[in-house]
Image (cartoon, rainbow, N blue to C red):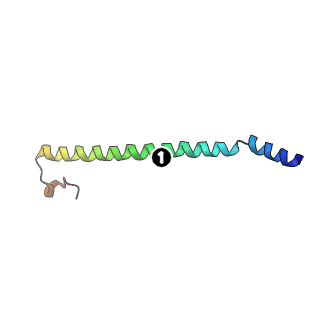
Amino acid sequence: MIKFKTLVKDFIEDESGLTAVEYAIAGGLVVGTMVVAFTQLGTAATGEIKDLCSAIGGSAATYDCDGA
């Protein structure tokens, strides 16, 4: 019975798994932030390219302004 108590106590005090979970959460947050940032950047870049095409008066066939 003493070995069981020692085993349970050691299991409760072991924090090595917590470090892995913390890194997983931090990594997930970083990846999520990057996805949102690149999505917003892509949308903004597409808008700017369309604005430039409109400003020079180009047609979609000549300058591929519609992205097709």
Residue 52 rendering spot, x and y as whole percentages: 18, 44
Instruction: Name the residue tied to disc 1.
Output: 31
Q: Which residue is more in the foreground, 7 or 44?
A: 7
The reply, left or right, for residue 3 in relation to residue 60 is right
Q: Which residue is more in the foreground, 5 or 64?
A: 5
Three-letter code, disc 1:
Val
Residue 8 rendering spot, x and y as whole percentages: 79, 46
Q: How many marks?
A: 1
- Identify the residue at image location x=54%, y=42%: 26
Residue 51 rendering spot, x and y as whole percentages: 18, 44
The quarter of the image holding the C terminus is: bottom left
Residue at the far right: name it.
2
- Identify the residue at image location x=59%, y=43%: 23
Residue at the far front: name it.
1
Within 10 Å of the Cα at label 1, are there few (<14), some (14-19), or many (20+) other Cα atoms? few
Residue 28 rendering spot, x and y as whole percentages: 51, 46
The reply, left or right, for residue 53 in relation to residue 41 is left
The reply, left or right, for residue 65 in relation to residue 41 is left
- Residue 55, quarter of the rendered image: top left
- Identify the residue at image location x=67%, y=46%: 17
The reply, left or right, for residue 38 in relation to residue 26 is left
Tag 1 secondary structure: helix
- Identify the residue at image location x=82%, y=47%: 7
